[in-house]
Amino acid sequence: GVSERHNRTLMDMVRSMLSNSTLLISSWIYALKIIMYLLNRVPSNAVPKTPFELWKNRAPSMRHMHV
């Protein structure tokens, strides 16, 4: 149940990103990679650290991110 909900949330985010951009529908895999990149760098409610911090034992740099 949890993994299915997570996958559905990811695909909803991909659809939202593609509908609000000029990207082609065929580039959905790139949108998914971007979303996963971002989600690995933001904190979650389950653990006090980000997934990136748990994996690399250091805080992620956010200086290269912009709208």
Image (tube, helix red, strand yellow):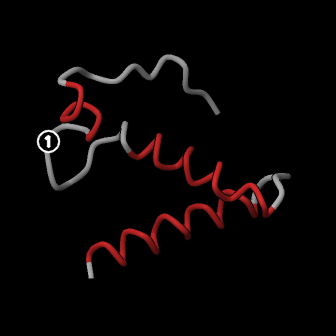
Figure quadrant of residue 25: bottom right
Left or right: 65 in relation to 20: left
In the depicted structure, whether residue 43 falls above or below residue 19: above
Q: Position of residue 47 (x, y in %)?
A: 14, 48
Query: Residue shown at 75%/64% (left/top)?
Result: 19
Q: Is residue 58 left or right of residue 65?
A: left
Judging by the rendered image, the residue that carries numbered circle 1 is 48
Q: Viewed as shown, does residue 38 lie left or right of 28?
A: left
The foreground one among 9 and 3 is 3
Q: Mark 1: few, some, or many residues within 10 Å (few <14, many ≥20)?
A: few
Quadrant of image for the C terminus: top right
Residue 44 vs 18, above or below: the answer is: above
Q: Dot 1: what SS?
A: loop
**Residue located 29% across and 34% down the image:** 52
In the image shown, does 39 or 20 lie closer to the viewer? Answer: 39
Quarter of the figure with the N terminus: bottom left
Indicate the position of residue 46 as horizontal and vertical percent values.
Answer: 16, 55
Q: Is residue 40 left or right of residue 25?
A: left
Three-letter amino acid code at the position of disc 1:
Pro
Please give the count of numbered marks on the rendered protein: 1
Q: Quadrant of residue 32?
A: bottom right
Q: Residue at x 54, y 19 (%)?
A: 64
Query: Residue 66: where, in percent of width, then height?
Result: 60, 28
Give percent across and percent down for residue 39. 41, 46
> In percent of the image, x 63 and y 55: which residue is there?
29
Query: In this picture, is 14 found above or below 30?
Result: below
From the viewer's perspective, is residue 28 above or below residue 57? Answer: below
